[in-house]
Image (spheres, grey):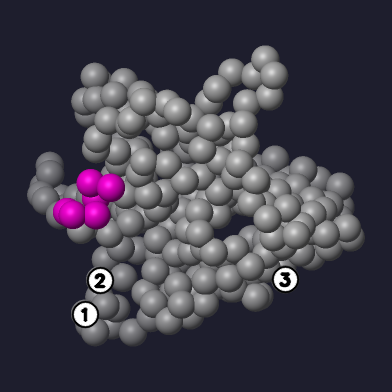
Amino acid sequence: MRRENERVKRYVHLSTGNYNSRTAKYYEDICLFTCREDIAYDAGLLFNMLTGYSTVQQMMRLTIAPSGLKRRFLDLINRETNRSRHEYPARIMAKVNSLTDVDIIKALYEASGAGVKISLCVRGICTLIPGIPGVSDNIRVISVIDHYLEHSRIYYFANGGAEEMYLSSADWMPRNLERRVELLFPVQDEKLRVELRNILFDYFRDNCQASVLDSNGVWTRRNPAEGEKRFRVQKEMLSRAARVSENTGTVKLEYNVRRSLPAER
């Protein structure tokens, strides 16, 4: 907070990860720096709740766990299910570290059965099974393992054409949704939303470090098809971050990468 033009202005930095200086050298995360008053107001409420200054308050933009985040995710998934049933554009894409929450998985299965196209990038544990006829045949699951530990959580919902993008500190796990203080925040600026959408979509283009999960629970490494150009998402993100650094102060969506990638294998 600082005084500007005879009024107090609030700035907020929100991240998909923590602020540990050691792990930041090896983890990939995405951060948002904003002075939007609605988000700053919610952040103030969150700190008041954490310090015991106030009880849980209704927020405008942010959603927190354990009080309401799981319900919010289920509502977003169910909305896509209803959109698909009424023949509106419906799609779900998510990048998480782990997917183990039973309620979330059931909602994704139901969405798949309703025709929602679902793409999931799950770095670690995934107890959802894709490709089961009539249950999860509209769900695709990949995992990207590379030089940096994939740590950001990104959520995309088509919402009938009015796309929504979210970043979060929470995975789809019971411990994150029910037993921890976690945060979900929207990316509302159109330029940043397009940039974040491109980042998320790029993970599903990776044909060097990505593996695909099948209906038998087996992961198979992706390789470029004949004539297909090699695409390694972390290398692309590192190049993108380097280009951003040449225009310091003009971009507020940051991809946190600190070291050079090893040569392509």
Q: How far apart are marks 3 and 1 (CA)?
A: 35 Å
**Would you call the spot at circle 1 few (<14 residues within 10 Å), some (14-19), or many (20 or more)?**
few
In front here: 118 or 47?
Answer: 118
Residue at position x 45%, y 28% from top? 265
Q: How crowded is mark 2: few (under 14 residues within 10 Å), some or many (20 or more)?
A: few
Give the residue number, with chain letter if any, for mark 1.
Answer: 51
Amino acid type for the residue under numbered disc 2 = Phe
The residues tagged by marks 3 and 2 sit, at their Cα atoms, a distance apart of 33 Å
Q: Earlier in the sequence, mark 3 or mark 1?
A: 1
Query: Can you say whether 10 is above or below 64 in the image?
Result: above
Residue closest to the eye, 264 or 16: 264
Magenta-tinted stretch? 21-26
Which residue is rendered at x = 49% and y = 30% of the image?
Answer: 232
Residue plotted at (55% across, 54% down): 122
| In front of the other: 181 or 82 | 181
Query: Gap in Å between the C-alphas at discs 2 and 1?
Result: 6 Å
What residue sits 12% from the left and 44% below the top?
4
